[in-house]
Amino acid sequence: MLSQRRAASSSSREAREVPEPRPSSSVLLLSPTNEVLLLHRVQSSTTFASAHVFPGGNLDPFHDGEVPAPDAPGRHQDGPAYRLGAVRECFEETGILLARRGGALLDLPVEQRDEMRKKIHANEVSFGEWVESLGGVPDTAGLIPFTRWITPVGVPKRFTTQMYVYLLPVSRPKGPSEMLIPTPDNGVEHTAALFAPPQAFLQRAAEQSIILFPPQYYLLHLLTRFITGGTGSLEEGPLHYTAQRRKLLSFLRRVPTAEMEEGRWNPTSGISWADKVMCPHRILMRESDGRVVLGLEKPGPELRDTRRGGDWERVALVRFGKGGPRDVEIRRRVDVMKEEKEAGGGAKL
């Protein structure tokens, strides 16, 4: 009986020690020419230090309204607070204001935007009230949910992050509007802000010139299937980029999401990209190259007894080290497991 009480006490203590994931939002912002915006985080950051990330951050009730409680159904679902937080964080971190007035994006002078970024970051002004004072509305309806990621247990700081795609209006043949040129936040959290093709960021990660964590790598990897580059003709540009976007949106709406027969049998195939939740977990370590194989189908301990889930069909291969994740690769699970089987089954579980 005593041993049972000790075991129960130990179990409850371990449960208490698992940090609650903080609600946050992040945006995959596509430029008028379908380039993706990434920010280079400062080296002193307590999360994702020195990595390239999408604009985003923690929800704040002061700006974003009521944030769902840890035990509320909306805690790990797309909702108003997550959407407003995504728009606000994008503005704070890049100066790009995703708000509309009269059907068009609000266009403000750089000086005014920079001043308000600082005030909103310092909670001196409510983001929503400021946008309303301009006669505008945050374009939360323009956000397209594209997976949620919950940090695995064992990491000191955990997050439940709703990812979104936002498509900036396709430009006509002229230079980009000044309001769509990103600028970093003067080193508060980021040292650089850059639009580039998703393929370019993946290539730089492969060359180890930038750090991409598995969620960012995974989402960029999926984008490369549809965002395939520019066109040599300025006149054809708008039609070219619009066609790419149609293919991407069709993919995001498609259910079942799996493409191979093996994947279609898994329940996660019936979960839309908007509702997928991924909490990476270790499957094995490859003896061939020392990389860890991470499964992406589980939703994390907070959603263990629900029907939520992620992507069974794909896995992430990662080499973890002091400098952050390296040699990240997204591959089909069946191919990776077949390789391990053919290698003699010497993988470390």
Image: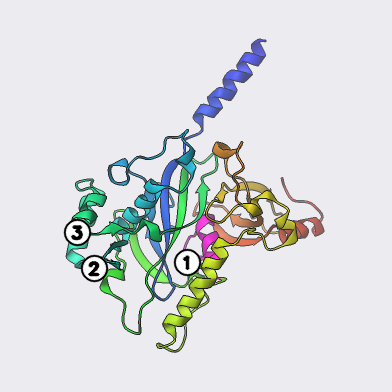
**Amino acid at the residue labelled 3:** Leu
Quadrant in which the C terminus is drawn: top right
Q: How is the image coloured?
A: rainbow
Magenta stretch encompasses residue 210: yes
Any part of residue 327 in sight? yes
N-terminal-most mark, 3 or 2:
2
Residue 238 locus on image (x, y percent): 42, 81
Name the foreground residue: 175 vs 295: 175
For numbered disc 3, what is the local secondary structure?
loop
Residue sitting at x 56%, y 52%: 320
Tell me if 74 is positioned left or right of 63 in this view. Answer: right
N-terminal-most mark, 3 or 1:
3
Please state the extent of the stretch shown in magenta in the rendering: 205-224
Query: What residue does disc 1 label?
Result: 209
Residue 90 locus on image (x, y percent): 34, 58
323 shown above or below 32: above
Name the foreground residue: 15 vs 156: 15
Please state which of the two labelled residues, at mark 3 or mark 2, is closer to the viewer.
Answer: 3
Query: What residue does disc 3 label?
Result: 134
Label 3–label 2 contact, CB within 8 A: no
Query: What residue does disc 2 label?
Result: 107
Quadrant in which the N terminus is drawn: top right
Label 3–label 1 contact, CB within 8 A: no
